[in-house]
Amino acid sequence: MRNSKMKYSRRTMIGSLAALSGLAVLPMPAWASGQMSRHKGGSMRKGIHELSGAKIDLHIGEGSFATGGCTGHAIAVNGTVPGPLIRMKEGEQTILSVHNMLSEDSSIHWHGLLLPFQFDGVPGISFPGIRPGARFDVPLTPRQSGTYWWHSHSGLQEQAGHYGPIIIDPAAPDPVEYDREHIILLSEFTPMHPHQIMKKLKVSEGYFSMQKTSASDDYPLSAEERLMWGRMRMMPTDIADVSAPTYTYLINGHGPEDGLELPFVPGERVRLRIINGSAMSFFNIRLPGLPMTVVQADGMNVQPVEVDELQIGVAETYDVIVTPIEAGAFAIAAESMDRSGMAQASLTSQPGRKAAFPALRDPPLLSMVDMGHGGMDHGGASDDAPMDHSKMDHAAMGHAMPEAAPADAHSGHDMSAMDMSGGMNMRDTSLLPDTVEVGPGIDMVAMAPQDRTGYPGLGLDNVPHRVLNYRMLKSLAMDHHKRAPDREMELHLTGNMERYMWSFDGKKFSAVGDDPIRFGYNERVRVKLVNDTMMAHPIHLHGMFFELVNGQGHHQPKKHTVIVQPGSSATFDVTTDEPGDWAFHCHLLYHMHAGMMQTVSVAFPDGAA
């Protein structure tokens, strides 16, 4: 369904949504009930099998999953973790039929796919969800190609194994030449129930951290720096909310002890489709001794760029080409960003021949730049002109810019602040627009947030080899018809790490009563994201691709997810040509669950109500 041909109003589409809700309670056929009995309570298999064709059936079940000596509850699709590879072709219709065999509601979101909003799979925003024993059909004619993925958007099911890959082959010849492909789907497994993890994070945000600083540790911190961090009640090692040993890191469902092997023949161009399908983990990917040529980001083709390592945020995808000339085995090392653990697989020319994996590197440390206090930043500023804040449409985002006030006038702001070290005010809320909701949900405000799209990721700015950053990404095709933005917006990523509260503009998401971010149909909007926290957030927009403002002009890369570095900003341009209600959220699962989410509402064309 292309927007230029859409004749439906929002009222018509919502009416269709109600009809689809009725469809979701169609009785399950007898053969599917048999499938349910086999899946419920059984042991889930590892690995990825492929499904394709005019109709694809997906059965959501539950059972147990084991790896690395740990066994726990799992939610799987078609009996495997990850679920099956859904393979489609651009322009060819497929019906995705989702059967919920659980005793609770479920859903599937088709991450990065362009489709009508009522099939996007987000309960409470775009459809009611799939009730136990019900079926939901998604008719889809792909109008794109590339590497994507799917996952639950219900509760915390994604953490328990409810995810899988998508490949859409192009209708035209693929501009990327390759002889063989492998999916590298990164995720985590834990025997701990996800709701128990959430409870522990709420009680103690640092519960899972094994890398706390102390007076006797080996971290390269001076006594003055230790005192400063102590006064701020923060840890420079507070990189990941949950990490190893709570998590075992997986590639295609296999933990490091499984010894996953992926074959190659010397001289082949091997395409690795890397998907970060984890709940909470950023990964640093490298194949020591084997360069990677990045050819695709978030499913969109980019101009080839050769690197030795890249950081992939939760929900991002990268396609890379590697060409091993000699026989042997190469380590596919996916080190967690906090360097507490590693997902592993061997790219090998001979069955049984395993690669030698590098040791975990020293944990990285947060810096003053990560607090939003400026200073030297290896990323630098964007090549594009700085944004004119006087033109920011704050009202459209739910807040207005305060009028100029004397330095001592801070009416309405919490100026108790946290004046910690050297006069730094960690909570100077006078820097925020007036209608950012100031309260216990904000424990930090970035004083001087920089554009850090040239930053390769925490701990990778001083390694002795080439590392990808967003400034290196250029779209393969030039956009000759690129429009200037009609207006500009600013949105703040806010949180209180100690209380584990996460939000946009200090406001926790609620599916009932929230005023959405509103766009007109086919608007061109520049959105600036300001991260007022000390954690990197992968921000995902459903239903539309945006163009990352990274200094590449008419070659700005298109993405659906962007990492906003700690204490920094990132900017994108979006053309709002996909009508309907869409989710917009941090893709760290427990951050989204805690409230860092919003609804984006795009008007229907022709003024339809």
Image: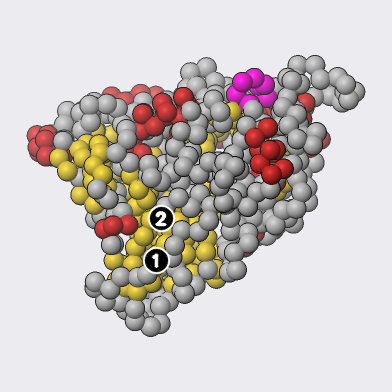
For the residues bearing labels 2 and 1, Cβ distance under 8 angstroms? yes
Residue 100 visible here: yes
Q: Which residues are magenta?
A: 436-442
Q: Nearer the viewer, residue 186 or 515?
A: 186
Residue 138 visible here: no
Say which quadrant the C terminus sits in.
Answer: top right
Helix, strand or loop: magenta stretch: loop
Provide residue 569's location: percent of width, then percent of height. 67, 43
What is the residue that sits farthest to the front in this orientation? Answer: 216
Report the number of discs.
Answer: 2
User: Residue 357: which disc?
Assistant: 1
Residue drawn at x 88%, y 21% is: 408
Q: Nearer the viewer, residue 177 or 415?
A: 415
User: Residue 342: which disc?
Assistant: 2
Amino acid at the residue labelled 2: Met
Report the Cα–Cα distance between label 2 and label 1. Answer: 10 Å
Q: Is residue 249 above or below residue 505?
A: below
The answer to which image quadrant residue 319 occupies is bottom left
Residue drawn at x 46%, y 33% is: 207
Q: Is residue 130 above or below residue 467?
A: above
Q: Nearer the viewer, residue 579 or 229?
A: 229
Provide residue 155's location: percent of width, then percent of height. 37, 29
Q: Secondary structure at mark 2?
A: strand
